[in-house]
Image (cartoon, rainbow, N blue to C red):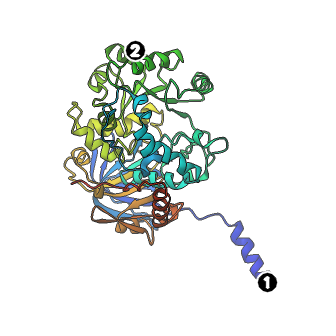
Amino acid sequence: MKRVLALLATLLLAAPAMAAPSLVIGGTIVTPQEIVSHGWLVIDGGKIAEITRTKPSLPGAHVLETNDLVFPGFIDLHNHPLWAVFPRFQPKPPPPAAPWPNRYAWRADPRYHAALQDRFGELLQEGEFCDMDEFAELQALMGGTTSLVGLDLPGLGPGAPPACISGLARNLDYASGFYGAATGRERLAWVLGVFSDMRFDTGRQVHDGIANGGLDLAVVHTAEGRRGDPESRAEFTMLKSWGLLGSHTAVVHGVALGAGEFAQMAKAGTALVWSPRSNMELYGETADVALARKDGIVLALAPDWAPTGSQNMLAEIGYAAGLGKGFSPRDLFGMATANPARIARLESKIGALEKGRYADLFLLKGDSRDPYQALVHAAPQDVTLTMVDGKPVYGARDHLAALGVSAPEMIAVCGQPRGFNPAVLPKPYAALVATLKQKMLAHGVRLAPIVTCKS
């Protein structure tokens, strides 16, 4: 009997792993070429295998038939995700108070240090990085974001990136999954600034990485301050001095920039990442994106961070739509999907629903007659499914069940039941929230809500 069992075990180990079943999703599919009403999307091996108007017949496939809108996942090129655990930063007088002249002013404000910076450092010292990261990535996924940047791992000190950064949203600067399971192979660099935040070795590495073809994109915070602020405008001059004004650079913020700087960016092929809500709350104004677009600069939209920006990309799109800057709902959609994919040179992988691209997508309840209008007016509970690499991560119970997710961990999202796929969570959500609440209360600060409902 022992020999028989040993033989069976050997055969099982030697047998090839069974391929995951194909997934078939029906709905109104938003593709670059057209909106496919009552269409079907087939996912195989983590990628989009087919988009068709006829329901496929695939034996053994998991099939989800909906009346929902199907969008490509958002690509967030500007975030500081770990700060999502903190409540909104809304300091009261006495002065100095917002609007500040530039990023250096509020970062030196004692109220900022007391509310955020000091508490942030204490949590990292206590080993809370992975919990903070999971909370932030789940918040992003709940708003349709499937790729993001900005973990700023150098702040953790030397060593390999923690394994916990893999498996939820794609971290394009550390662990996208596009270059194998290992970290540190990414072709995107995220740089906090060009003055005190840009060390000489960092600037040299980024410049050399672009020059030798090892980097496709450097995302650099530049000119983050009010128009005419000399310190902010000097950052643009510093960016040029580093040799980083080129087609492999995306300027983040650019609030202080004017016609001359935008003309130079357009000539060099430099992109602009726009974060309007955070700009308005911190500086009382935002980048002149109408002028930037007129000059032909490629624009991406991103929320910056939760304390003064939006909690995720879906919320930032809604905010941007209300500013009246001349962008149509379809423009804003493109600034959250195809444009950032193009800026990061990832347009063959993500940013659109097309055959051969990775199955990073989300489903949304809304009027199929005008998906883009539905998108800019969407509420958090309208997201019914988010997938990364063809894996369901978050969504409505029936959607998850149809795609083979059993026993999701359910939560209430603005009065609607939504769930997380327990197979992809580093830590169960309830345990995650309990730990963060306890740790943060010990430092005199409360955990922010993972979602804010529309009133």
Per the rendering, the mark at residue 131 is: none
Of callouts 1 and 2, the N-terminal one: 1
Q: Measuring 41% from the left and 56% from the top, which residue is drawn there?
A: 447
Q: Quadrant of residue 6?
A: bottom right
* Viewer-nearest of discs 1 and 2: 2
Residue 362 locus on image (x, y percent)? 36, 53
In this view, the residue in front, 71 or 375, is: 375
Residue 383 locus on image (x, y percent)? 32, 56
Are the residues at dot 1 and dot 2 in contact (C-beta closer than 8 Å)? no
Q: Quadrant of residue 154?
A: top right
Q: Is residue 148 shown to the viewer in this render?
A: no
In this view, the residue in front, 1 or 130, is: 130
Q: Is residue 185 shown to the viewer in this render?
A: yes
Residue 185 locus on image (x, y percent)? 61, 39
Where is mark 2, residue-wise? 264
Q: Measuring 37% from the left and 38% from the top, which residue is drawn there?
A: 302
Task: Identify the amino acid type marked 1.
Answer: Lys
Where is mark 1, residue-wise? 2
* Quadrant for the C terminus in the image: bottom left
Under circle 1, the secondary element is: helix
Q: Is residue 329 left or right of residue 63?
A: left
How packed mark 2 is, by other alpha carbons closer than 10 Å (few <14, some 14-19, many 20 or more), is: some
Task: Identify the amino acid type marked 2.
Answer: Gln
How packed mark 1 is, by other alpha carbons closer than 10 Å (few <14, some 14-19, many 20 or more), is: few
Q: Establish if 157 lies above or below 404.
A: above
Instruction: Give the Cα distance between marks 1 and 2.
Output: 76 Å
Tell which residue pokes out farthest to the right in this image. Answer: 3
